Amino acid sequence: MSQSTTFTILLGGELRLTDRLRAATAGSRFIAADGGMRHAVTLNTTPELWVGDFDSTPAELRGAFPHVPKQPYPAAKAATDGEIAISEAIDRGAKRLILAGAMGGERSDHAIQHLLYGVQLAEKGFDVLLTSGDEEAVPLLPGDLELALPAGSLFSILGFSDLTSLFIHNARYPLRDFHLPFGASRTISNVAEGVVRLSLGSGRAIVLARPYDLSGV
């Protein structure tokens, strides 16, 4: 078995195979959470584990992966299938976590929870990427962060608290030593001019990017 410390967690939201998604998951190990197993077909991979209560897994999907070890849980449980899958990855040595299918789909509660949990994982020292293929999210914590985005692509910063000493470099709307109050929209819909460099003094946030949306050109 591969000893890669990068794990891709297949979640139930939307997912489109893009060049960036293919590159991010190259060499990764995979764990599927319930109906997220359908993305194994998209990514042409066979996960090493399949967890969940399987309430959103159709019979034909189960039949397509008969040899993948399953770890069933009751529907009445204290964590989502996605969180259980992430815990399994961490137990297996994960350092980088790619949450594929973490955004969009029919369940906005799950999508928002994935964003919040992604920030918590980053606070614990994990390298985290959430992606739908078309959209990517990366936690922003105190310190520096670089995002390799195509020039003209859109990105936004959503603060989950007050943000202090926020710097945005190499973007159409730069900021310097900015205080962003919790809930403010000042950092929505910026445009990358290449590699975006961010710095944060205090607070926690998520950066949402649309690398294939070049409407800002």
Image: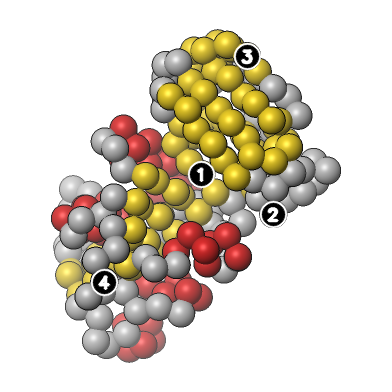
Question: Is tag 2's residue or tag 4's residue first in the polypeptide sequence?
Answer: 4
Circle 2 sits in a helix, a strand or a loop, which is it?
Answer: loop
Q: Quadrant of the C terminus?
A: top right
User: In 3D space, how far apart are the residues under numbered discs 2 and 1 (Cα atoms)?
Assistant: 14 Å
| Neighbours of disc 1 within 10 Å: few (<14), some (14-19), many (20+) | many
Circle 4 residue = 2
Nearest the eye: 30 or 182 = 30
Circle 1 residue = 137
User: In 3D space, how far apart are the residues under numbered discs 2 and 4 (Cα atoms)?
Assistant: 31 Å
Circle 4 sits in a helix, a strand or a loop, which is it?
Answer: loop
Q: Are circles 1 and 4 on residues that touch, CB within 8 Å?
A: no
Question: What numbered label is drawn on residue 176?
Answer: 3
Question: Is tag 2's residue or tag 1's residue first in the polypeptide sequence?
Answer: 1
Q: Quadrant of residue 27?
A: bottom left
Q: Amino acid at mark 2?
A: Tyr
Q: Quadrant of residue 203?
A: top left
| Neighbours of disc 3 within 10 Å: few (<14), some (14-19), many (20+) | few
Question: Is tag 3's residue or tag 1's residue first in the polypeptide sequence?
Answer: 1
At horizontal 34% and vertical 51% (from top left) the residue drawn is: 96
